[in-house]
Image (spheres, helix red, strand yellow):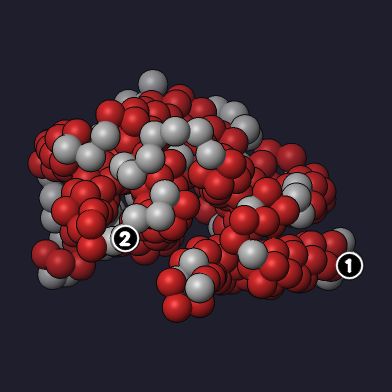
Amino acid sequence: MNEHINSSTVTLNNPIAGQRTTIIQDIKSLVKFIVLIANVLPVIAGFWLALHFTNTSLTEHLGTFLLTIGGSGLVIAGALILNNWYDVDIDTVMERTKQRPTVTGNFSLRAVLIMGIAASVLGFILLLFTSISAVIYALIGWITYVFFYTMWTKRRYTWNTIIGSVSGAVTPLIGWAAIDASFHIVPFALFLLLFIWQMPHTYAIAIKKNDEYKAAKVAMLPAVRGFKVTKVHMVIYIALLFPIPFLLSSLGTTFMVIASILNAAWLALAIRGFYMKDNYKWANWNFLYSVNYMTILFLLMIFVTLPIFYN
């Protein structure tokens, strides 16, 4: 169990503590705004695809849509806030996290804890007005991220990435379950897509920030077992993405072809890592590719199921 340091300790020991930032900047940092948006997008995609495959329209379920996005967004934000609260000691060491309000002392740790719990509870309440299944999926993601990833495996085991990937992979299931609780191959495929994708994506970040993870004593794979082993894992996981477009064949040939091309290009980029001398440059390329890969795929899922396109 991590032993937390209080906010006064952070302020005294951190050279940038007390640095002025706006309240908006602090809140965006606290909820990891980009990460939050990246996790809400699959919720929207899952919701949209459920509408498509149940032959219903967004106008019929506009209220449910707003509750789903608002509820899931708050649950995810709450989990991310609690991650910041728990990881304050790590964040004081890592360069990219030293501006977070938990580190600067702009927000007390007690206030951050209350905010994380309040956001989570409010989010679950909103999701209760959609479906029990949506709440269950959100709860699985929240518990996995806060307890199993943040508090248990992140500091101890290299397979923390696998645990963390589960929490991110349930997001499209939340959106789907708000409309249709029955089993369908599409949400299952979306879960697999996100689960597998997060592995090479996170490993790329871990290589980029390897020195910082080592300094913070976080058990990321590159820091523990080296770059070569990590590259092998990345190639394996990217290769596992190849069957996913065929599981989503109901989205049409256009989606399958584009998704397959994206998979092939990423695999080629991953294999190139064995021949490049600059590991950090290669890792950055993979990180940028992974972000664009997922954004393109989820936007494409929505595009190919637009009524004007599909009909």
The tag earlier along the polypeptide, 2 or 1, is 2
On screen, residue 289 above or below 134: below
In-image side of 169 versus 231 (left or right) = left
Relative to 144, does residue 73 appear above or below in the rendering? below
Q: Nearer the viewer, mark 2 or mark 1?
A: 2
Q: Is residue 1 visible?
A: yes
Query: Which SS class for mark 2?
Result: loop
Amino acid carrying label 1: it is: Tyr
Classify residue 135 by image quadrant.
Answer: top left
Label 1 residue SS = loop
Label disc, if present, on residue 275 of the rendered structure: 1
Residue 275 drawn at (x, y percent): 89, 67
**Measuring 28% from the left and 61% from the top, which residue is drawn there?**
58
Is 146 situated above or below 43?
Answer: above
- Residue 276 in the image: state x and y as whole percent: 83, 70
Question: Can residue 40 be seen in this snapshot?
Answer: no
